Amino acid sequence: MAWHRILFQLSYLVGMKPWDSGVSPPELIEWVEGPAALPPGRALDIGCGTGTNCKYLLDHKWEVTGVDFVPRALKAAKLKAPGARLIAGDVTKLEELGVSGPFDLMLDLGCFHSIPDSRRDAYAREAARVAAPGATSLIFAFGEKGPGGIIATEDEIRQRFGAQFDIAEVRPGRPYLKQTWYRLIRKPS
């Protein structure tokens, strides 16, 4: 098991998970409730953790699937978002997990930048495979090396996703580790 998988398992075990605030991010809220709100449809929360965003999306009439590899996180998600389809497994192998889409909205709150470089192309392929044409994908990532070397720069996002997705927006977040939100739109097949 890779060190990052062990780190996440231990973090959920001891309850120290700084990435899990229990509050949906304003960027997601903007796209679900704001002036250009997406109509409810099918959503995929990639690396759903304890289900905070699954619950938020369910509360706003979305049909939600969440995927995470940490059983303890999914146990919490089942309590928090009982209407979501929650799946344990590797987000770079969605097809093997029976996740087929098409999804209208995909959310990744810090999952992609935590995946080893050798699996990131598989992640991008799987995201493109399950996204409906015109689907919105929201990805949050650190643009500077974080704890354990976690990073996904704008150049990398463009390189790995650019063939299948248009990069519609790059929005800086807090300056700590150059936090960045990417809004991608799935190109027509």
Image (spheres, helix red, strand yellow):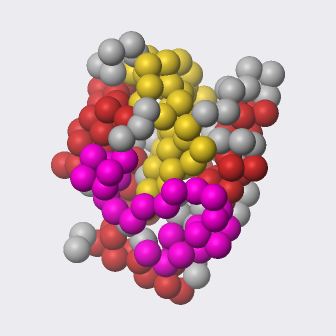
Residue at left offset 42%, top offset 71%: 70
Q: Say if 71 sits above or below 133 in the image.
A: below
Residue 116 visible in this rendered orientation of the protein:
yes
Residue at left offset 65%, top offset 41%: 62
Residue 140 visible in this rendered orientation of the protein:
no
Residue 67: image location, x then y, percent: 44, 57
**Quadrant in the picture for the N terminus:** bottom left
Residue 128: image location, x then y, percent: 34, 30
Which quarter of the figure has residue 55?
Answer: bottom right
Give 92 or 85, whichever is nearer the viewer. 85
Q: Say if 153 sits above or below 22 in the image.
A: above
Residue at left offset 64%, top offset 53%: 53
Q: Say if 172 sits above or below 11 in the image.
A: above
**Quadrant in the picture for the C terminus:** top left
Residue at left offset 38%, top offset 55%: 114
The furthest residue to the bottom: 14
Give 48 or 102, whichever is nearer the viewer. 102
Q: Say if 61 sits above or below 96 in the image.
A: above
Task: Give the residues drawn in magenta, as a range.
Answer: 71-99
Residue 57: image location, x then y, percent: 67, 46
Residue 144 sits inside the magenta stretch: no
